[in-house]
Image (cartoon, grey):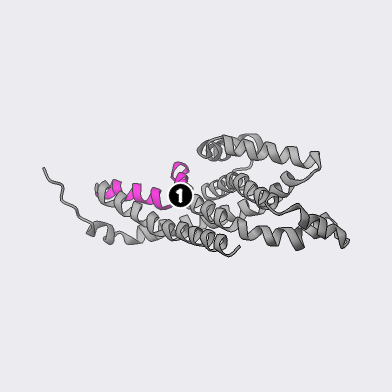
Amino acid sequence: MDYVWHFGIVWDYRVVFLRGAWITALLTLYSTLIGVSLGLLFGLFRSSSIVILRWPAAVYIEFFRATPVLVQLVWIYYSLPILTGLQMSGIASVSVGLGLHAAAYFAEIFRAGIASIDKGQWDAARSIGMGYGQAMWRIILPQAVRRMVPPFINEFATLIKLTTLGSVLAVYELLHEANNLINNTYRPLEVYTVLALAFAVLIYPIILLSQRLERYWKTNS
């Protein structure tokens, strides 16, 4: 029997998608803020010559990169309250979990960006009396940031996709709202098709921007 598509049902429930999109945007924003803040800190530690800073940062980065993000989210939501007595909401758990996970990747982006700057820049900074912190903030990071932007944008796009894992913790982001809509309408093909298209519309321009910036800076470097 030929399947009869009925996308009108999705339009009738468009408020559900808008509500899910809002939660997805919040999760992406919160996790990005956490990820960039911690990523900068651990990236600087990872680039440090001080062992007591470098090794803990390396352990953190490798641990979060080597373990599945879904396991991290579930552990934060279910296990952390048992150990600490701190019970976070689903949105908070997903934001913190994704933020901690993203921080490991942002840290590597910071580290690689810093390492890409010629050592002569450090020597020039020292020759005019700058210390490590001054040289980092006034000379090294401003140059490194341009090289970091494309991978930063890619990681941001990845975070948007990872917010769908919030559905496991009953967070009403796009995927969870879509599943609820399917339970009410019994139209999975239409709902999942629109969901896929919605993420494509959200994420493709971000990826395209990253590619354009990367090509632009390569040709103008």
* Location of residue 50 by image quarter: top right
- Of helix, strand and loop, which mostly describes the magenta segment? helix
* Magenta span contains residue 172: yes
* Location of residue 17 by image quarter: bottom left
Compared to 139, does 163 lie above or below?
Answer: above
Q: For the point 66% across and 54% down, which residue is it?
A: 37
Asked whether residue 192 is in view, the answer is yes
Q: Position of residue 43 (x, y in %)?
A: 69, 48
- The N terminus lies in quadrant: top left
Nearer to the camera, 109 or 171: 109
Instruction: Please indicate whether residue 75 sits to the left or right of residue 200 in the image.
Output: right
* Magenta span contains residue 41: no
Q: Tell which residue pokes out farthest to the right in this image.
A: 129
Q: Position of residue 175 (x, y in %)?
A: 39, 49
Which residues, given as a range, are shown in magenta? 163-185
Nearer to the camera, 81 or 191: 191
Q: Position of residue 125 (x, y in %)?
A: 82, 60
Q: For the point 31% across and 49% down, which residue is it?
A: 192
Asked whether residue 38 is in view, the answer is no
Number of marks: 1
Instruction: Please indicate whether residue 139 sits to the left or right of residue 213 in the image.
Output: right
Q: For the point 61% across and 55% down, which residue is it?
A: 148
Q: Position of residue 72 (x, y in %)?
A: 56, 38
Nearer to the camera, 107 or 221: 221
Q: Check disc 1: other Cα within 10 Å, few if <14, some if 14-19, many if 20+.
A: some
Residue placed under numbered mark 1 in the picture: 161
- SS for callout 1: helix
Amino acid carrying mark 1 in the image: Lys
- The C terminus lies in quadrant: bottom right
Instruction: Please indicate whether residue 112 sits to the left or right of residue 155 in the image.
Output: right
Q: For the point 56% across and 53% down, which residue is it?
A: 151
